[in-house]
Image (cartoon, rainbow, N blue to C red):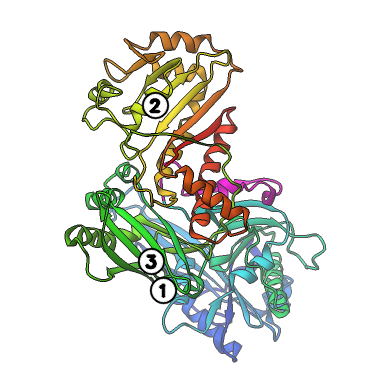
Amino acid sequence: MEEGYQDSISPVPAAAMTPFLSLTILEITIDDLEVGYGRLVEEVGKRALKCRRGRRSIAASGIQAEDCDEHGFGWAADADHSLDAMVVQCEHHPGWMKEDHIYTDREHKLVILLRRRALVAVHADLPGLRDSIQSWLDNSPPPPFRRITEGVMHAAFIRGDAKGLWLRGTHARRTTKADSKNISGRRLSDALLPHEDSSFAMGSARAALPSDINLNALSGIIGSTPRKSQMWARATASMADFLAQADDALSMVEDVMSAGITMDQPYPLLARKEENLGVVKGAFDFSILDAANIASVPNVDPDLAEAAELLSDSILEIQGSSTSSNFVLQVGEHGAICGSLSGRINAGKDCVTFNFGYKGEPTNGPPVRRILTALNLYADSLLTIYFESGHTVVEKALWKREIRSAPFPNWEFHDLRPFDITCEKPPVKGDQKIHDAIGVAGDTSLFAWVVQHYANGWLICDDGSGEVADFIHISPDRDATLSLIHVKGAASSTARRQIAVGPYEVVSSQAAKNIRYLSSEHLHKALSDPSIARPACWTDGKRVSGRSEFLEMLECRRQSDPVRVVIVQPHVSEAIHVTTSNDRDRGLNNTPNVLRMSLLDALLNTARSSIVGCGADLHVIGGHL
């Protein structure tokens, strides 16, 4: 790819080209800019010819100096600029055909490099070349180039109103929340929702350039992927137009760097990736990926699902360090602490990982050993840890997220004695047997408490596969309030249990997911065909046969009658809720329980916002103790 061309290869036909403006922007890191640029040209040329299937060859290379002058971009050959281009011919068999057959697809791809002083723009529409360049930049020792920092890319290209955002989740993956999402609109900074979007990070953005920027050709809406040092805009009218817009892009980056301007968070509500493990401290809470979410994934590793179930059923209590990201886990089973494990986060080249070991001698070795083995094998996939510094470690990545949420307003606390707050339903197997056992003599589960608490009116149980909710209730008063009741047992019944997000994640997701049944029409249809022969039903606290009375009352309700979604999850007691609220009122916002409550508030408010949008409200029931 030297300037000019060899006898056997034609120069690039610059006059006929209308490239799409898509650039990877790099900075040369050595003093001799020409040498650095030459190294980049050579490396890009080598990588452009590499492919996993088919073959590639150079069809055209170089741009003649007279073409630059004739077609309006002679400036690209001055002392501050360098310009190179190549056309790569790609030959491969069609994807729908075996490789040894007769047909061959042939296409031509364009590569352009433009240097403006220490900055270089690389245009590559060749499959895999942009990713190959990204990998090369991460080599050790590094090449004499580097990406433009995210802060500079933000400041250069995300100046005006956001028109499009590509968001990737920083939360643990689950079936009830998207892993990623793309949104578009007129000014998206106003459209982001604290409860919905604060666990997402910006991957790419499209933003309008302000009209007062002094540029020669670049205008309108500009897209960028800051972490990859990439930007894009639109198809250009000619090679001269492409180069003028590319030079404007380099000029914008150059001006921002010269002024020392950075913009770490163009959208403060969103999470951002953290590169410095040294600022992470104060682990205060964690969550385990729910085994039910894992089981829904095709071809899932059964050992992973088993580890998730083991960790979910175990006692895990976290104690963080005020000076580092290290932490200690008190672990055990069946309500008893059996030992301690030390936890450490290791920062690798492209990810962060957990490492666990014994801390002291366990009082009961076998369960601690099982938990330690599960953590060291699967914590990177299952465990999310939250830090007082505002950081979160999830799925091998470290994120900075703002923990801010208004207190969830609809807590209710009841005397749940003598019921077992850790037992969700009667301890029998089979849907029919569970329905038969609810509320009978000896049943101390939370299902039995629901039957006692909602003794007035019409109550049915829908527990089982494809359930609407665990229970549905219609009150006997004039309001005929419809309640969809979701029940989950507390993680522990000990009085020393702390606030935790984990016990509420699955049940709040279920509550939000089933809001379609807030419509009487959908609810009636779903309940008219029960999955078992004898679903449990009560009228004014007495068992009745079948759902006919309930369905009659459902048909009598008016569309304006109130609807509630109720979560019965007594892990947070009234005592700890009052203590935490008092700490908040006194401005003690960084205590572990206040931070945990902020996370829980965010979770519940997210679910509530979806439910309120459908004309209902969310209430959460806990116990006094």
Residue at 68 percent across and 56 percent down: it is 207
State the image coordinates of residue 513 (x, y, percent, origin top left).
46, 34
Q: Which residue is mark 1?
A: 349
Q: Is residue 492 left or right of residue 551?
A: left
Can see residue 172?
yes
Report, in whole angstroms, how far the alpha carbon at label 2 lies from the one at label 1.
51 Å
State the image coordinates of residue 496 (x, y, percent, origin top left).
38, 52
Comparing labels 2 and 1, the label whose residue is closer to the camera: 2
Q: Is residue 137 left or right of residue 448?
A: right
Residue at 71 percent across and 49 percent down: it is 187
Report, in whole angstroms, how far the alpha carbon at label 3 lies from the one at label 2.
63 Å
Q: Amino acid at mark 1?
A: Lys
Image height of 152 relative to 509, above or below = below
Q: Dividing the image into 4 quarters, which one contains the C terminus? A: top left
Instruction: Look at the image and say whether residue 456 sits in the magenta stretch.
Output: no
Q: Which residue is mark 3?
A: 51
Magenta extent: 173-197
Q: Amino acid at mark 3?
A: Cys
Q: Nearer the viewer, residue 327 or 477?
A: 477
Q: Amino acid at mark 2?
A: Val
